[in-house]
Amino acid sequence: MASKVKNMTSGAPGKLILLFAIPLMLGNICQQFYTMVDTMVVGNIVGVEALAAVGAADWLVWLVLGVASGMTQGFSILVAQYYGAEDWEKLKKSIAHSYVLTVILAVFVLAVSQSVVYQVMLFLNTPADIIDMSMIYLRIVFCGIPVISAYNILASVLRAMGNSKSPLVAMILAALINVVLDLTFVGGFGWGVAGAAVATVIAQAFSAVYCYAVLRKIDLIHLEKHHFKLEGGLCRKLLGLGAPLAIQNAIISVGGLTVQYVVNGFGFLFVAGFTATNKLYGVLEMAAISYGYAITTYVGQNLGAGKVDRIKKGVRSGTVMALITSLVISLLMVVAGKSILALFVSGEAGQVAQVLEISYKYLFIMAIFLWVLYLLYVYRSAIQGLGNTVIPLASGIAEFVMRVGVALILPRMIGQNGIFYAEISAWSGAALLLILSYFFVIRKYQQY
Protein backbone atom coordinates (compact mmCIF):
# COMPACT_ATOMS: atom_id res chain seq x y z
CA MET A 1 0.00 0.00 0.00
CA ALA A 2 2.79 2.45 0.88
CA SER A 3 4.04 2.49 -2.70
CA LYS A 4 0.57 3.39 -3.96
CA VAL A 5 -0.03 6.44 -1.75
CA LYS A 6 2.17 9.32 -0.57
CA ASN A 7 1.92 11.50 2.52
CA MET A 8 3.06 15.05 1.66
CA THR A 9 2.84 16.52 5.16
CA SER A 10 6.54 15.99 5.89
CA GLY A 11 9.75 16.36 3.90
CA ALA A 12 11.16 19.09 1.64
CA PRO A 13 8.17 20.84 -0.03
CA GLY A 14 9.87 21.58 -3.35
CA LYS A 15 11.19 18.04 -3.71
CA LEU A 16 7.80 16.54 -2.86
CA ILE A 17 5.98 18.73 -5.39
CA LEU A 18 8.54 18.07 -8.12
CA LEU A 19 8.62 14.30 -7.58
CA PHE A 20 4.82 14.25 -7.58
CA ALA A 21 4.61 16.42 -10.69
CA ILE A 22 7.16 14.56 -12.83
CA PRO A 23 5.04 11.41 -13.37
CA LEU A 24 2.05 13.65 -14.11
CA MET A 25 4.12 15.55 -16.69
CA LEU A 26 5.14 12.29 -18.32
CA GLY A 27 1.51 11.20 -18.27
CA ASN A 28 0.45 14.49 -19.83
CA ILE A 29 3.14 14.07 -22.48
CA CYS A 30 1.60 10.71 -23.35
CA GLN A 31 -1.88 12.20 -23.38
CA GLN A 32 -0.78 15.08 -25.59
CA PHE A 33 1.15 12.66 -27.75
CA TYR A 34 -1.93 10.66 -28.63
CA THR A 35 -4.00 13.84 -29.06
CA MET A 36 -1.36 15.11 -31.47
CA VAL A 37 -1.25 11.76 -33.26
CA ASP A 38 -5.02 12.04 -33.76
CA THR A 39 -4.50 15.42 -35.38
CA MET A 40 -1.45 14.40 -37.41
CA VAL A 41 -3.14 11.29 -38.77
CA VAL A 42 -6.33 13.18 -39.61
CA GLY A 43 -4.48 16.18 -41.09
CA ASN A 44 -2.08 14.12 -43.18
CA ILE A 45 -4.25 11.18 -44.24
CA VAL A 46 -7.70 12.78 -44.53
CA GLY A 47 -6.70 16.39 -45.30
CA VAL A 48 -6.91 20.03 -44.25
CA GLU A 49 -10.72 20.07 -44.14
CA ALA A 50 -10.73 17.15 -41.70
CA LEU A 51 -8.16 18.97 -39.55
CA ALA A 52 -10.43 22.00 -39.50
CA ALA A 53 -13.44 19.80 -38.64
CA VAL A 54 -11.72 18.37 -35.57
CA GLY A 55 -10.56 21.86 -34.60
CA ALA A 56 -14.06 23.31 -34.90
CA ALA A 57 -15.18 20.70 -32.34
CA ASP A 58 -12.35 21.32 -29.85
CA TRP A 59 -13.91 23.88 -27.53
CA LEU A 60 -17.24 22.06 -27.44
CA VAL A 61 -15.42 18.88 -26.40
CA TRP A 62 -13.55 20.92 -23.79
CA LEU A 63 -16.84 22.33 -22.51
CA VAL A 64 -18.50 18.97 -22.00
CA LEU A 65 -15.48 17.12 -20.64
CA GLY A 66 -14.42 20.16 -18.61
CA VAL A 67 -17.65 20.00 -16.61
CA ALA A 68 -16.94 16.37 -15.70
CA SER A 69 -13.24 16.91 -14.94
CA GLY A 70 -13.93 20.04 -12.88
CA MET A 71 -16.43 18.20 -10.73
CA THR A 72 -14.12 15.24 -10.07
CA GLN A 73 -11.20 17.56 -9.35
CA GLY A 74 -13.33 19.29 -6.74
CA PHE A 75 -14.26 15.96 -5.15
CA SER A 76 -10.58 15.05 -4.84
CA ILE A 77 -9.88 18.14 -2.72
CA LEU A 78 -11.91 16.68 0.15
CA VAL A 79 -10.25 13.29 -0.34
CA ALA A 80 -6.80 14.91 0.01
CA GLN A 81 -7.84 16.78 3.16
CA TYR A 82 -9.21 13.67 4.87
CA TYR A 83 -6.10 11.74 3.85
CA GLY A 84 -3.86 14.44 5.35
CA ALA A 85 -5.96 14.43 8.54
CA GLU A 86 -5.75 10.59 8.64
CA ASP A 87 -9.54 10.35 9.05
CA TRP A 88 -9.91 7.01 7.30
CA GLU A 89 -13.66 6.53 7.70
CA LYS A 90 -14.46 9.96 6.22
CA LEU A 91 -11.90 9.28 3.51
CA LYS A 92 -13.74 6.11 2.46
CA LYS A 93 -17.14 7.81 2.54
CA SER A 94 -15.91 10.76 0.49
CA ILE A 95 -14.48 8.43 -2.16
CA ALA A 96 -17.65 6.31 -2.33
CA HIS A 97 -19.88 9.39 -2.55
CA SER A 98 -17.60 10.82 -5.25
CA TYR A 99 -18.08 7.68 -7.33
CA VAL A 100 -21.88 7.84 -7.06
CA LEU A 101 -22.06 11.56 -7.87
CA THR A 102 -19.74 11.08 -10.85
CA VAL A 103 -22.01 8.39 -12.32
CA ILE A 104 -25.06 10.65 -11.97
CA LEU A 105 -23.20 13.58 -13.54
CA ALA A 106 -21.89 11.47 -16.45
CA VAL A 107 -25.38 10.26 -17.39
CA PHE A 108 -26.76 13.80 -17.24
CA VAL A 109 -23.94 15.34 -19.30
CA LEU A 110 -24.17 12.56 -21.88
CA ALA A 111 -27.91 13.12 -22.37
CA VAL A 112 -27.64 16.91 -22.63
CA SER A 113 -24.62 16.94 -24.93
CA GLN A 114 -26.11 14.55 -27.46
CA SER A 115 -29.38 16.47 -27.45
CA VAL A 116 -28.05 19.93 -28.26
CA VAL A 117 -24.75 19.42 -30.07
CA TYR A 118 -26.01 20.02 -33.64
CA GLN A 119 -27.83 23.23 -32.74
CA VAL A 120 -24.72 24.50 -30.98
CA MET A 121 -22.50 23.79 -33.99
CA LEU A 122 -24.93 25.69 -36.22
CA PHE A 123 -25.01 28.57 -33.77
CA LEU A 124 -21.21 28.71 -33.80
CA ASN A 125 -21.25 29.44 -37.53
CA THR A 126 -19.32 26.25 -38.32
CA PRO A 127 -18.37 26.31 -42.03
CA ALA A 128 -20.74 24.20 -44.16
CA ASP A 129 -17.89 22.23 -45.73
CA ILE A 130 -16.74 20.79 -42.38
CA ILE A 131 -19.84 20.65 -40.14
CA ASP A 132 -20.79 17.07 -41.08
CA MET A 133 -17.33 15.76 -40.18
CA SER A 134 -17.36 17.77 -36.94
CA MET A 135 -20.70 16.22 -35.97
CA ILE A 136 -19.46 12.67 -36.55
CA TYR A 137 -16.44 13.35 -34.36
CA LEU A 138 -18.50 14.96 -31.58
CA ARG A 139 -21.22 12.29 -31.48
CA ILE A 140 -18.65 9.54 -30.95
CA VAL A 141 -16.53 11.44 -28.41
CA PHE A 142 -19.63 12.32 -26.38
CA CYS A 143 -20.65 8.64 -26.29
CA GLY A 144 -17.42 8.16 -24.35
CA ILE A 145 -18.37 10.61 -21.58
CA PRO A 146 -19.06 7.84 -18.98
CA VAL A 147 -15.69 6.25 -19.73
CA ILE A 148 -13.80 9.55 -19.55
CA SER A 149 -15.62 10.51 -16.34
CA ALA A 150 -14.63 7.17 -14.81
CA TYR A 151 -10.96 7.81 -15.59
CA ASN A 152 -11.16 11.36 -14.21
CA ILE A 153 -12.57 10.35 -10.82
CA LEU A 154 -10.34 7.30 -10.40
CA ALA A 155 -7.18 9.24 -11.34
CA SER A 156 -8.27 12.15 -9.11
CA VAL A 157 -8.61 9.87 -6.08
CA LEU A 158 -5.17 8.38 -6.73
CA ARG A 159 -3.59 11.84 -7.03
CA ALA A 160 -5.34 13.08 -3.88
CA MET A 161 -3.59 10.33 -1.93
CA GLY A 162 -0.20 11.19 -3.38
CA ASN A 163 -0.10 8.61 -6.18
CA SER A 164 0.93 10.27 -9.43
CA LYS A 165 2.68 7.21 -10.89
CA SER A 166 -0.38 5.07 -11.60
CA PRO A 167 -2.09 7.78 -13.70
CA LEU A 168 1.22 7.97 -15.61
CA VAL A 169 1.12 4.25 -16.41
CA ALA A 170 -2.54 4.62 -17.39
CA MET A 171 -1.69 7.41 -19.82
CA ILE A 172 1.22 5.48 -21.34
CA LEU A 173 -1.14 2.55 -21.88
CA ALA A 174 -3.75 4.84 -23.42
CA ALA A 175 -1.20 6.54 -25.67
CA LEU A 176 0.11 3.27 -27.09
CA ILE A 177 -3.39 1.92 -27.69
CA ASN A 178 -4.54 5.19 -29.26
CA VAL A 179 -1.63 5.37 -31.70
CA VAL A 180 -2.17 1.79 -32.88
CA LEU A 181 -5.92 2.30 -33.23
CA ASP A 182 -5.49 5.65 -35.01
CA LEU A 183 -3.28 4.11 -37.66
CA THR A 184 -5.63 1.13 -37.95
CA PHE A 185 -8.97 2.95 -38.02
CA VAL A 186 -7.99 6.07 -39.96
CA GLY A 187 -5.08 4.86 -42.07
CA GLY A 188 -6.05 1.22 -42.51
CA PHE A 189 -9.85 1.16 -42.46
CA GLY A 190 -10.34 4.67 -43.86
CA TRP A 191 -12.81 5.72 -41.17
CA GLY A 192 -11.65 9.37 -41.21
CA VAL A 193 -12.46 11.56 -38.20
CA ALA A 194 -14.76 8.84 -36.84
CA GLY A 195 -11.77 6.52 -36.53
CA ALA A 196 -9.83 9.11 -34.54
CA ALA A 197 -12.77 9.61 -32.16
CA VAL A 198 -13.32 5.86 -31.62
CA ALA A 199 -9.60 5.35 -30.96
CA THR A 200 -9.61 8.07 -28.29
CA VAL A 201 -12.62 6.63 -26.44
CA ILE A 202 -11.26 3.07 -26.46
CA ALA A 203 -7.84 4.24 -25.24
CA GLN A 204 -9.43 6.21 -22.40
CA ALA A 205 -11.43 3.14 -21.38
CA PHE A 206 -8.25 1.14 -20.91
CA SER A 207 -6.73 3.90 -18.75
CA ALA A 208 -9.86 3.91 -16.54
CA VAL A 209 -9.71 0.14 -16.07
CA TYR A 210 -6.05 0.35 -15.07
CA CYS A 211 -6.69 3.05 -12.43
CA TYR A 212 -9.58 1.02 -11.02
CA ALA A 213 -7.36 -2.05 -10.72
CA VAL A 214 -4.77 -0.02 -8.77
CA LEU A 215 -7.37 1.41 -6.37
CA ARG A 216 -8.76 -2.05 -5.68
CA LYS A 217 -5.38 -3.08 -4.27
CA ILE A 218 -5.18 -0.23 -1.71
CA ASP A 219 -6.39 -1.73 1.58
CA LEU A 220 -6.69 1.69 3.18
CA ILE A 221 -9.69 2.56 1.01
CA HIS A 222 -11.41 -0.80 0.78
CA LEU A 223 -15.02 0.34 0.39
CA GLU A 224 -18.05 -1.41 1.82
CA LYS A 225 -21.74 -1.12 1.03
CA HIS A 226 -22.51 1.34 3.85
CA HIS A 227 -19.94 3.82 2.50
CA PHE A 228 -22.13 4.27 -0.59
CA LYS A 229 -25.23 5.16 1.43
CA LEU A 230 -25.63 8.81 0.45
CA GLU A 231 -25.49 11.39 3.23
CA GLY A 232 -26.93 14.80 2.44
CA GLY A 233 -24.23 16.74 4.29
CA LEU A 234 -21.35 14.98 2.59
CA CYS A 235 -22.98 15.27 -0.85
CA ARG A 236 -23.44 18.99 -0.33
CA LYS A 237 -19.82 19.33 0.77
CA LEU A 238 -18.53 17.49 -2.30
CA LEU A 239 -20.82 19.35 -4.67
CA GLY A 240 -19.85 22.62 -2.99
CA LEU A 241 -16.24 21.90 -3.98
CA GLY A 242 -16.91 20.35 -7.37
CA ALA A 243 -19.69 22.53 -8.78
CA PRO A 244 -17.72 25.81 -8.81
CA LEU A 245 -14.86 24.12 -10.68
CA ALA A 246 -17.28 22.56 -13.16
CA ILE A 247 -18.96 25.93 -13.67
CA GLN A 248 -15.53 27.56 -13.98
CA ASN A 249 -14.57 25.14 -16.76
CA ALA A 250 -17.95 25.69 -18.45
CA ILE A 251 -17.53 29.46 -18.37
CA ILE A 252 -13.98 29.22 -19.76
CA SER A 253 -15.27 26.92 -22.50
CA VAL A 254 -18.09 29.28 -23.47
CA GLY A 255 -15.44 31.98 -23.87
CA GLY A 256 -13.48 29.57 -26.05
CA LEU A 257 -16.59 28.85 -28.10
CA THR A 258 -16.96 32.58 -28.69
CA VAL A 259 -13.40 32.65 -29.99
CA GLN A 260 -14.20 29.65 -32.19
CA TYR A 261 -17.25 31.50 -33.54
CA VAL A 262 -15.04 34.40 -34.59
CA VAL A 263 -12.39 32.08 -36.05
CA ASN A 264 -15.00 30.12 -38.04
CA GLY A 265 -15.91 33.35 -39.82
CA PHE A 266 -12.39 33.57 -41.27
CA GLY A 267 -12.76 30.38 -43.37
CA PHE A 268 -11.59 26.79 -43.05
CA LEU A 269 -7.90 27.53 -43.79
CA PHE A 270 -7.74 29.92 -40.84
CA VAL A 271 -9.61 27.33 -38.74
CA ALA A 272 -7.02 24.71 -39.74
CA GLY A 273 -4.09 26.97 -38.78
CA PHE A 274 -5.74 27.89 -35.50
CA THR A 275 -6.39 24.19 -34.83
CA ALA A 276 -2.77 23.18 -35.45
CA THR A 277 -1.57 25.58 -32.75
CA ASN A 278 -4.37 24.61 -30.37
CA LYS A 279 -3.20 21.01 -30.60
CA LEU A 280 0.16 22.25 -29.27
CA TYR A 281 -1.65 24.16 -26.51
CA GLY A 282 -1.70 20.92 -24.55
CA VAL A 283 2.08 20.66 -24.87
CA LEU A 284 2.48 24.25 -23.70
CA GLU A 285 0.41 23.76 -20.56
CA MET A 286 1.13 20.12 -19.72
CA ALA A 287 3.73 20.93 -17.06
CA ALA A 288 1.47 23.65 -15.64
CA ILE A 289 -1.35 21.13 -15.20
CA SER A 290 1.06 18.73 -13.49
CA TYR A 291 2.34 21.37 -11.07
CA GLY A 292 -1.28 22.32 -10.45
CA TYR A 293 -2.32 18.81 -9.44
CA ALA A 294 0.79 18.46 -7.28
CA ILE A 295 0.14 21.75 -5.49
CA THR A 296 -3.55 21.01 -4.93
CA THR A 297 -2.71 17.65 -3.34
CA TYR A 298 0.17 19.11 -1.34
CA VAL A 299 -1.88 22.03 -0.02
CA GLY A 300 -4.93 19.85 0.68
CA GLN A 301 -2.98 17.28 2.68
CA ASN A 302 -1.10 19.92 4.66
CA LEU A 303 -4.28 21.85 5.37
CA GLY A 304 -5.82 18.64 6.72
CA ALA A 305 -2.74 18.26 8.94
CA GLY A 306 -2.95 21.93 10.02
CA LYS A 307 0.49 22.88 8.62
CA VAL A 308 -0.05 26.33 7.12
CA ASP A 309 3.64 27.31 7.08
CA ARG A 310 4.42 24.27 4.93
CA ILE A 311 1.72 25.36 2.52
CA LYS A 312 3.43 28.74 1.99
CA LYS A 313 6.82 27.13 1.46
CA GLY A 314 5.39 24.66 -1.04
CA VAL A 315 3.61 27.33 -3.07
CA ARG A 316 6.82 29.42 -3.24
CA SER A 317 8.79 26.40 -4.45
CA GLY A 318 6.09 25.54 -6.96
CA THR A 319 6.10 29.07 -8.32
CA VAL A 320 9.85 29.04 -8.98
CA MET A 321 9.77 25.61 -10.64
CA ALA A 322 6.77 26.55 -12.77
CA LEU A 323 8.37 29.76 -14.05
CA ILE A 324 11.62 28.01 -14.98
CA THR A 325 9.71 25.26 -16.78
CA SER A 326 7.58 27.76 -18.72
CA LEU A 327 10.67 29.60 -19.96
CA VAL A 328 12.24 26.35 -21.24
CA ILE A 329 9.05 25.36 -23.10
CA SER A 330 8.68 28.87 -24.53
CA LEU A 331 12.20 28.79 -25.94
CA LEU A 332 11.59 25.37 -27.49
CA MET A 333 8.39 26.55 -29.20
CA VAL A 334 9.94 29.74 -30.55
CA VAL A 335 12.89 27.85 -32.03
CA ALA A 336 11.26 24.62 -33.22
CA GLY A 337 7.57 25.50 -33.32
CA LYS A 338 7.25 25.89 -37.10
CA SER A 339 8.83 22.50 -37.74
CA ILE A 340 6.49 20.86 -35.22
CA LEU A 341 3.42 22.53 -36.72
CA ALA A 342 4.37 21.24 -40.17
CA LEU A 343 3.72 17.70 -38.90
CA PHE A 344 -0.01 18.47 -38.66
CA VAL A 345 -0.59 19.71 -42.22
CA SER A 346 -0.48 18.23 -45.70
CA GLY A 347 -2.09 19.06 -49.03
CA GLU A 348 -1.73 21.67 -51.75
CA ALA A 349 1.46 23.70 -51.23
CA GLY A 350 -0.23 27.10 -51.20
CA GLN A 351 -2.79 26.04 -48.61
CA VAL A 352 -0.16 24.41 -46.42
CA ALA A 353 2.00 27.56 -46.45
CA GLN A 354 -0.97 29.71 -45.51
CA VAL A 355 -2.02 27.40 -42.67
CA LEU A 356 1.52 27.28 -41.26
CA GLU A 357 1.89 31.07 -41.36
CA ILE A 358 -1.33 31.48 -39.37
CA SER A 359 -0.48 28.77 -36.85
CA TYR A 360 3.08 29.94 -36.12
CA LYS A 361 1.98 33.53 -35.49
CA TYR A 362 -0.46 32.25 -32.90
CA LEU A 363 2.08 29.85 -31.35
CA PHE A 364 4.76 32.56 -31.07
CA ILE A 365 2.43 34.91 -29.18
CA MET A 366 1.35 32.19 -26.75
CA ALA A 367 4.94 31.08 -26.16
CA ILE A 368 6.08 34.59 -25.24
CA PHE A 369 3.40 34.91 -22.57
CA LEU A 370 3.42 31.30 -21.35
CA TRP A 371 4.82 32.23 -17.92
CA VAL A 372 1.52 33.98 -17.15
CA LEU A 373 -0.39 30.72 -17.69
CA TYR A 374 1.97 28.88 -15.34
CA LEU A 375 1.43 31.42 -12.56
CA LEU A 376 -2.32 31.04 -13.10
CA TYR A 377 -2.15 27.28 -12.53
CA VAL A 378 0.06 27.52 -9.43
CA TYR A 379 -2.12 29.98 -7.56
CA ARG A 380 -5.47 28.59 -8.71
CA SER A 381 -4.39 25.13 -7.57
CA ALA A 382 -3.15 26.44 -4.22
CA ILE A 383 -6.48 28.14 -3.57
CA GLN A 384 -8.37 24.97 -4.55
CA GLY A 385 -6.21 22.93 -2.18
CA LEU A 386 -7.27 25.30 0.60
CA GLY A 387 -10.84 24.19 -0.06
CA ASN A 388 -11.89 27.42 -1.78
CA THR A 389 -13.37 26.80 -5.22
CA VAL A 390 -15.36 30.04 -5.40
CA ILE A 391 -12.30 32.21 -6.16
CA PRO A 392 -11.22 29.89 -9.01
CA LEU A 393 -14.79 30.23 -10.31
CA ALA A 394 -14.37 34.02 -10.20
CA SER A 395 -11.10 33.62 -12.12
CA GLY A 396 -13.02 31.65 -14.75
CA ILE A 397 -15.41 34.58 -15.08
CA ALA A 398 -12.42 36.90 -15.45
CA GLU A 399 -11.05 34.65 -18.19
CA PHE A 400 -14.42 34.71 -19.93
CA VAL A 401 -14.70 38.49 -19.86
CA MET A 402 -11.16 39.03 -21.14
CA ARG A 403 -11.28 36.29 -23.78
CA VAL A 404 -14.67 37.30 -25.19
CA GLY A 405 -13.96 41.02 -25.03
CA VAL A 406 -10.71 40.75 -26.93
CA ALA A 407 -12.12 38.20 -29.43
CA LEU A 408 -15.06 40.41 -30.34
CA ILE A 409 -13.26 43.77 -30.37
CA LEU A 410 -9.61 43.39 -31.38
CA PRO A 411 -10.11 41.64 -34.76
CA ARG A 412 -12.34 44.54 -35.79
CA MET A 413 -9.52 46.94 -34.98
CA ILE A 414 -6.41 45.17 -36.31
CA GLY A 415 -7.78 42.31 -38.44
CA GLN A 416 -7.63 38.53 -38.09
CA ASN A 417 -4.43 38.54 -36.03
CA GLY A 418 -6.33 40.22 -33.20
CA ILE A 419 -7.91 36.88 -32.29
CA PHE A 420 -4.49 35.58 -31.25
CA TYR A 421 -4.45 37.89 -28.22
CA ALA A 422 -7.73 36.63 -26.74
CA GLU A 423 -6.07 33.71 -24.98
CA ILE A 424 -3.19 35.56 -23.34
CA SER A 425 -5.55 38.34 -22.24
CA ALA A 426 -7.69 35.70 -20.52
CA TRP A 427 -4.62 34.26 -18.76
CA SER A 428 -3.52 37.69 -17.57
CA GLY A 429 -6.86 38.72 -16.09
CA ALA A 430 -7.32 35.43 -14.24
CA ALA A 431 -3.71 35.23 -13.00
CA LEU A 432 -3.83 38.71 -11.48
CA LEU A 433 -7.03 37.90 -9.59
CA LEU A 434 -5.72 34.54 -8.34
CA ILE A 435 -2.34 35.82 -7.13
CA LEU A 436 -3.92 38.64 -5.13
CA SER A 437 -6.59 36.30 -3.75
CA TYR A 438 -4.08 33.65 -2.65
CA PHE A 439 -2.15 36.06 -0.44
CA PHE A 440 -5.40 37.32 1.06
CA VAL A 441 -6.70 33.80 1.79
CA ILE A 442 -3.46 32.38 3.20
CA ARG A 443 -3.15 35.37 5.54
CA LYS A 444 -6.55 34.51 7.01
CA TYR A 445 -5.43 30.94 7.74
CA GLN A 446 -2.35 32.19 9.58
CA GLN A 447 -4.56 34.09 12.02
CA TYR A 448 -5.98 30.89 13.47
Image: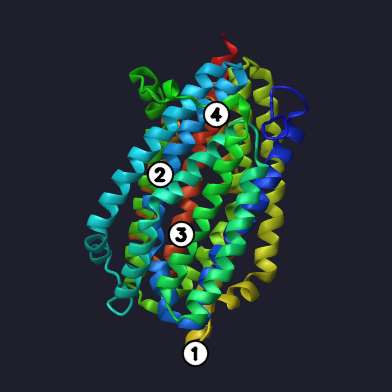
The image quadrant of residue 21 is top right
Amino acid type at circle 2 is Ala
Amino acid type at circle 1 is Gly
Amino acid type at circle 3 is Val
The image quadrant of residue 122 is bottom left
Do we see residue 117 in this rendering? yes
Tell me the distance, in whole angstroms, between the alpha carbons under discs 1 and 4. 50 Å
Tell me the crowding category of disc 4: few under 14, some 14 to 19, or many 20 or more residues within 10 angstroms, Cα based.
many
N-terminal-most mark, 1 or 3? 3
Q: Secondary structure at mark 3?
A: helix
Do we see residue 368 in this rendering? no
Residue 68 position, x and y percent, is: 40, 44
Q: Which mark is residue 68?
A: 2
The residue indicated by pointer 4 is: 385
Q: Which mark is residue 137?
A: none
Tell me the distance, in whole angstroms, between the alpha carbons under discs 1 and 3. 34 Å
Q: Which mark is residue 201?
A: 3
Tell which tag, 1 or 2, sits nearer the viewer.
Answer: 2
Amino acid type at circle 4 is Gly
Tell me the crowding category of disc 1: few under 14, some 14 to 19, or many 20 or more residues within 10 angstroms, Cα based.
few
